[in-house]
Image (spheres, rainbow, N blue to C red):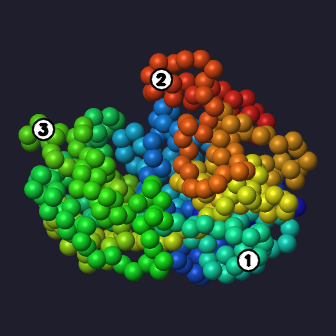
């Protein structure tokens, strides 16, 4: 009894781990390091190609709930993330390299997992989970297209933010704080006056973009919109978005600046910081020129510039069931961002569910059927809901979960009650895992 899992990203590693933990042997196929994509920099598994943040860790936030469900269910990815976390206020951010190394070591050392290096260009026989990610190679994409009926692919574009060295940040124009003093002071906040902001905005709107074949602004997923695309929507869009100063008073003046650029720690040592919300596909020289207009970053040293790449995902409501299997061809399942779940934690959740439910089926056990009241189940049911006319990538949110059967005053309290309902269900299910 063997399952082939294609792709050693977050979803693929989680899926392989859950299968192997249940006694199912796994062949995990990964094309790196033999073949890399423009967005990949490391040969390790579970590489985080965009932000190093897994977003909020609070139960009043849907992604915080999803993380807690996965923790309670024995997720490898969450275990490694918790082991390599760096301070980020109320968010779960990780040391990028340490996290990948921890996942890679765990997967490679598992006796039930065999790693096969090299690009996969055809769908193997037997049970297969395709977790090749949004950067699926052309060869595998062609094989998937042959497997699936009709026009099954959709595309959007994704962008990564630049990373700078801490020692190159001018702290005379910046300070450590978290918004509204929530959690610890983990972010570097770079102030801009109104004059500085307007000059920066003008140059950002007119800066030269790197050529991306087939790129159109309308195809950019909102959650990873390049900062220059956002800026072109209006002069105040950034000031009310990623550069909003609310809850970040400058300790020198006691007043909120006109705008604030936040930097988040990118490694455990605190030597690298990424520009929060600054996903971009500007030319590298333009990134240095324009971002140097931020006073604290005037002499910033960039260890990685922002990059833009095409992401591919399936029209999943037409194709997949609640276990992420292909309808009518259940030997093949998908997991991760290629299914249209958006985000690191959501990708992990899809790999977890696909692995657990496939193992149970192969072992002759009844499915667990995570219900819509849980974040894991709600995400799977959203992706597999037939009849969706305009399917778009989706982060987990409380809106795709059933409402409470009683009134709770206040959004935060209501979300907390939704989380407690979900965790009660998960605690009952995990006894069968």
Q: Residue 407 location in percent, x, y?
A: 55, 17
In the picture, measured across the screen, residue 218 lies left or right of residue 70, that is left
Element at label 1: helix
Instruction: Work out whether mark 2 precedes mark 3 in sequence or the reverse, and give the earlier one.
Output: 3
Labelled pair 1, 3 in contact (Cβ < 8 Å):
no
In the picture, measured across the screen, residue 211 lies left or right of residue 203, that is right
Q: Residue 197 location in percent, x, y?
A: 16, 56
Instruction: Work out whether mark 1 precedes mark 3 in sequence or the reverse, and give the earlier one.
Output: 1
Pointer 1 residue: 143
Mark seen at residue 330: none
Identified at 27% across, 64% down, the residue is 165
Residue 67 visible in this rendered orientation of the protein:
no
Pointer 3 residue: 255
User: Foreground residue, 265 or 236?
Assistant: 236
In the figure, 22 relative to 118: above or below? Answer: above
Mark seen at residue 413: 2
Identified at 60% across, 24% down, the residue is 404
In the picture, measured across the screen, residue 278 lies left or right of residue 332, that is left
Identified at 34% across, 35% down, the residue is 183
Q: CA distance from mark 2 to mark 3?
A: 30 Å
Identified at 11% across, 36% down, the residue is 254
Q: Residue 297 location in percent, x, y?
A: 19, 63
Disc 3: CA contacts within 10 A as few (<14), some (14-19) or many (>=20): few
Q: CA distance from mark 2 to mark 1?
A: 47 Å
Q: CA distance from mark 1 to mark 3?
A: 58 Å
Labelled pair 2, 1 in contact (Cβ < 8 Å):
no
Disc 1: CA contacts within 10 A as few (<14), some (14-19) or many (>=20): some
């Amino acid at each position: 009894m063997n399952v082939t899992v294609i792709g050693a990203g977050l979803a693929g590693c989680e899926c392989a781990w859950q299968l192997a933990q249940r006694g199912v042997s796994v062949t995990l196929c990964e094309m790196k390091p033999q073949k890399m994509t423009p967005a990949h920099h490391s040969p390790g598994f579970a590489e985080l190609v965009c932000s190093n943040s897994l977003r909020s860790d609070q139960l009043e936030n849907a992604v915080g709930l999803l993380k807690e469900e996965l923790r309670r269910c024995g997720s490898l990815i969450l275990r490694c993330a918790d082991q390599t976390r760096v301070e980020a206020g109320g968010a779960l951010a990780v040391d990028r390299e340490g996290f990948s190394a921890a996942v890679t070591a765990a997967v490679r050392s598992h006796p039930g997992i065999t790693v096969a290096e090299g690009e996969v260009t055809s769908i193997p026989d037997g049970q297969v989970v395709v977790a090749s990610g949004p950067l699926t190679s052309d060869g595998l994409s062609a094989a998937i297209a042959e497997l699936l009926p009709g026009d099954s692919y959709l595309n959007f574009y994704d962008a990564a933010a630049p990373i700078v060295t801490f020692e190159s940040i001018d702290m005379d124009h910046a300070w450590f704080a978290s918004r509204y003093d929530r959690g610890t002071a983990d972010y570097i906040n770079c102030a801009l006056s109104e004059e500085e902001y307007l000059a920066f905005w003008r140059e950002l709107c007119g800066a030269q973009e790197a050529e991306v074949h087939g790129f159109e602004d309308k195809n950019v997923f909102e959650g990873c919109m390049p900062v220059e695309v956002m800026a072109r929507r209006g002069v105040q869009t950034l000031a009310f978005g990623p550069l909003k100063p609310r809850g970040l008073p400058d300790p020198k003046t006691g007043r909120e600046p006109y705008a604030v650029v936040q930097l988040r720690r990118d490694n455990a040592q605190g030597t690298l910081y990424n520009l929060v919300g600054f996903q971009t596909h500007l030319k590298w020289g333009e990134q240095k020129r324009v971002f140097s207009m931020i006073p604290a970053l005037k002499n910033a040293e960039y260890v990685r510039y922002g990059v833009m790449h095409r992401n591919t995902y399936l029209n999943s409501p037409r194709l997949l069931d609640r276990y992420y299997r292909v309808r009518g061809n259940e030997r093949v399942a998908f997991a991760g961002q290629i299914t249209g779940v958006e985000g690191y934690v959501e990708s992990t959740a899809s790999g977890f569910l696909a692995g657990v439910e496939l193992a149970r089926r192969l072992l002759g056990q009844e499915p667990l059927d995570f219900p819509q009241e849980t974040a894991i189940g709600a995400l799977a049911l959203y992706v597999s809901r037939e009849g969706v006319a305009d399917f778009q990538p989706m982060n987990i949110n409380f809106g795709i979960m059933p409402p409470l059967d009683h009134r709770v005053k206040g959004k935060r309290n209501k979300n907390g009650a939704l989380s407690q309902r979900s965790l009660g269900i998960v605690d009952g299910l995990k006894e069968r895992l």
